[in-house]
């Protein structure tokens, strides 16, 4: 029997399980047309993902438990261009490897932060820009590179100042032995 046989079902709550596959179409149809509320893991929800905001769109699942690994894969595909870091080549391979590893981001220590000020997607975008700048301008040789390329919040890295919602507002690295081409994507810091 399928879930449609449960004619009075109002809630289907399945997060934090090890279910394989996507929620069946019949349950999704009931969720989007009736009064069924579905709460499930990202791996099981067929909802579309908005790569401009880093959020799942309205669809089958009403509430989605984000998975850090899936989220970082979506980030790498959308922002870096590929989830296969080796295919990117050069510095982008290192940027991708760094960004794809949850251990490199202290905000994921206890799973996905549901109420992160400023938004996780935006935070990751700014972090990737700073990591790229560090790698492309000889960051390991800087006079002061405290915190850079570590797992700590980049708002604590030497010379980086952020708002209370973790958005970069100042980047001050004078007399710090930066070398190489001027980082072209710094204008993407908002």
Image (spheres, rainbow, N blue to C red):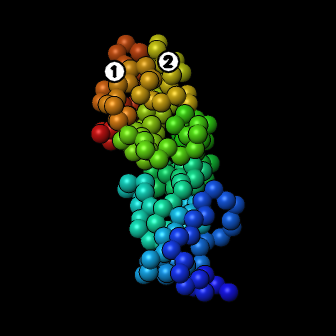
Q: Where is residue 46? Give x, y as percent.
A: 53, 70
Q: Where is residue 161? Give x, y as percent.
A: 35, 25
Who is closer to the viewer here, 78 or 15?
A: 15
Who is closer to the viewer here, 48 or 97?
A: 48
State left or right for residue 112 relative to residue 2: left
Image quadrant holding the N terminus, namely bottom right
Tell which circle, 2 or 1, labels the residue nearer the N-terminal end.
2
Image quadrant holding the C terminus, namely top left
Instruction: Name the residue rendered at 44%, 71% in the picture.
Output: 59
Q: Quadrant of residue 106?
A: top right
Q: Where is residue 124? Give x, y as percent.
A: 45, 42
Disc 2 secondary structure class: loop
Q: Quadrant of residue 167?
A: top left
Q: Which mark is on residue 172?
A: 1
Who is closer to the viewer here, 89 or 33?
A: 33
Instruction: Name the residue rendered at 46%, 66% in the picture.
Output: 62
Instruction: Name the residue rendered at 38%, 24% in the picture.
Output: 160
User: Does any portion of residue 184 appear in the rendered image?
Assistant: no
Disc 1 secondary structure class: loop
- Classify 43 as above or below 104: below
Q: Which mark is on residue 154?
A: none
Mark 2 and mark 1: span between their CA atoms? Answer: 13 Å
Q: Which mark is on residue 146?
A: 2
């Amino acid at each position: 029997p399928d879930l449609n046989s449960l004619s009075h079902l109002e809630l289907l709550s399945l997060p934090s399980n090890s279910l394989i596959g996507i929620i069946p179409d019949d349950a999704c149809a009931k969720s989007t047309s009736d009064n069924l509320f579905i709460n499930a893991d990202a791996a099981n929800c067929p909802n579309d993902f908005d790569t401009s905001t880093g959020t799942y769109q309205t669809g089958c699942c009403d509430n989605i438990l984000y998975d850090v690994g899936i989220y970082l894969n979506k980030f790498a595909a959308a922002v870096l261009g590929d989830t296969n870091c080796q295919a990117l080549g050069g510095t982008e391979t290192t940027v991708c490897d760094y960004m794809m590893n949850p251990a490199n981001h202290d905000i994921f220590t206890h799973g996905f932060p549901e109420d992160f000020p400023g938004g996780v997607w935006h935070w990751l975008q700014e972090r990737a820009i700073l990591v790229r700048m560090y790698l492309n301008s000889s960051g390991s040789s800087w006079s002061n590179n405290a915190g850079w390329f570590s797992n700590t919040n980049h708002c604590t890295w030497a010379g980086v100042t952020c708002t209370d919602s973790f958005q970069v507002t100042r980047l001050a690295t004078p007399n710090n032995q930066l070398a190489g081409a001027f980082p072209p994507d710094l204008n993407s810091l908002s």
